Image (tube, rainbow, N blue to C red):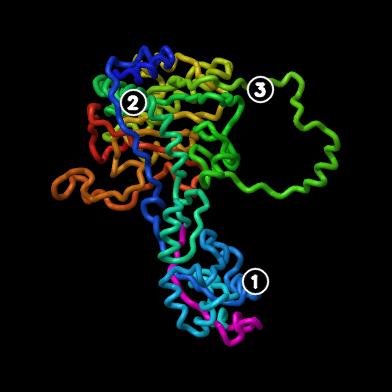
Amino acid sequence: MSDSMKEVVETLDPVTRRLLPPNINTGTLVPLKSILELRDNLSLGLAYIARAPNKATNDVINVARALAGDDAANNLPHLRRCVKPSDLSPHLKTAFMNEGNGRQVHLGKSNWLYIVLGLKKDLPFEELVNGLASIDAIRDDVFIGTIPVPLLAPTSQVQANMWSQQYWQTVYRKNNPLGPHPSTISRTEATVSRDASIWMTLAHEIAKKSQKAGLGEPIGAVIIKRTLPGRPDPKGTSAKEGTVGSDSNGEGVGADADADADGEAGSPDATEAEPTDTMGVANQLGSLNLDAEPEGASRPAAATKETTQIVAIAADARWYQQEKTGHTGNPMAHAPLRAISMVAQKLVRAENRPHTEPQIMEFESFQDKPLLADEQTVFDEEHPCPDGYLCHELELYLTHEPCTMCAMAILHSRMGRIVFRHRMPLTGGMSSEDRGYDACGASGTCDHGECGGGRGLGLHWRKELNWTLLGWEWESDDTESLLVDAHLHP
């Protein structure tokens, strides 16, 4: 064990130190890509552009807006609406200079501008020509060109500069419309990488113990709570749909997140607030001191150093009481589901609800009670922050990529981050890469018929869902591989 790893181990909670094996294998974190980052990095469309004197610019834009509608007219915010002839890329200058009064427009001190009207599919050509011809400053000098333009915003200044030379003047607005912002990933990765090997080691250990005991496949899950220095530990906060929470990087969604990205990792999609009559509210409040805290109120103390504590550890238990679960095992006893349920039970336990006798059942489908000694050890400890919503701001470490069912459960639990080692190309729900037809490794036709094909789901970052989280694949050459059937749903 390296000296740096020994320092990390010394900061761990007593339970984690007791469970850790002597040897901790190291690995490398590889960020997961979103489906848009893999498929739509450069998606082009055809756009109409016109040229007009400076004084007629607003009239031209109004014509395009009237034909396309406000939404269609504003769907290219990363492109400069108006560009001087001298700022066009060389190939556009050459193409436009020889059309109509192009030489007059391009030579000398021109007071003309080129204007992006909108996408070709949104604008009827004949009506557009008639609309521009009705403008006094244009009349018979109607010019409409068609050019390819990027449909999505650039993700770096370098990319914006390149697109400006190849297509049209493009603006980089310091965000990533395709996925989590690079600065968010690098900042969070620096934090997670310090102890990721510890949690992945524990996940591997519990997976091997489960397989040895005949409970399930060699699949393990570990959930931890991380508290960052200088940040109050949230109390009484919950992440609900349509509300703005805080991300698991220790920064408020809507503050740093808005500056860095279109939605932060580990955050719900915030809905736009309705406008309010601020003057009326101010008059009603009068001279109230809005900064004064209620008498007796206490503010949560900020952490002085980074701390981590294990909250749950669970192994796959799909083969436990196998005779009652069918040939594919119990789908409700997957490792991620068992770990999340153990967190939920700790939260319920912290509420001190009246004790009720559990109902005696012939078969318990969820199998969310501890079955191994390590599971019981962690389960007996109290939740470090029992006031939050389920798994809000927690981190999940898995030996295998979760299946689609477990991936959606992870999202619904409001998990902050996820790290897994083995990809499951046929059944996994987090990766975005397309599924190959040889993913199962079978030579010739697979026993299951034609397998593979189709697109990955990339559920960790789908903007149409109401929750996103950062994800990594953990690569390690030193750690024993836990092989499972390629068709298995982890």
Query: Which x, y percent locates residue 310?
Result: 43, 20
The residue beneath circle 2 is 197
The residue beneath circle 1 is 58
348 or 112: nearer the viewer = 112
Specify the segment rendered in magenta.
130-152
Distance from disc 3 to disc 1, alpha carbons, whole Å, reads 52 Å
Query: Which x, y percent locates residue 101?
Result: 52, 84
| Disc on the earlier residue, 3 or 1 | 1
Q: Please give left or right for residue 365 compared with residue 126 in the image.
A: left
| Image quarter of the C terminus | top left
Query: Which x, y percent locates residue 199?
Result: 36, 24
The answer to the question of whether label 3 and label 1 lie on touching residues, with beta carbons closer than 8 A, is no
Question: Mark number for residue 23?
Answer: none
Q: Please give left or right for residue 455 compared with residue 172 in the image.
A: left
**Secondary element type, mark 3:** loop
The answer to the question of whether label 2 and label 3 lie on touching residues, with beta carbons closer than 8 A, is no
Task: Spot the residue most to the bottom.
Answer: 140
Q: Residue at x 45, y 57 (%)?
A: 160
Distance from disc 1 to disc 2, alpha carbons, whole Å, reads 59 Å
| Disc on the earlier residue, 1 or 2 | 1
| Disc on the earlier residue, 2 or 3 | 2
Q: Is residue 156 above or below residue 288?
A: below
Q: Please give left or right for residue 240 compared with residue 149 in the image.
A: right
Question: Mark number for residue 299?
Answer: 3
Q: Which amino acid does the dot numbered 3 rest on?
A: Arg
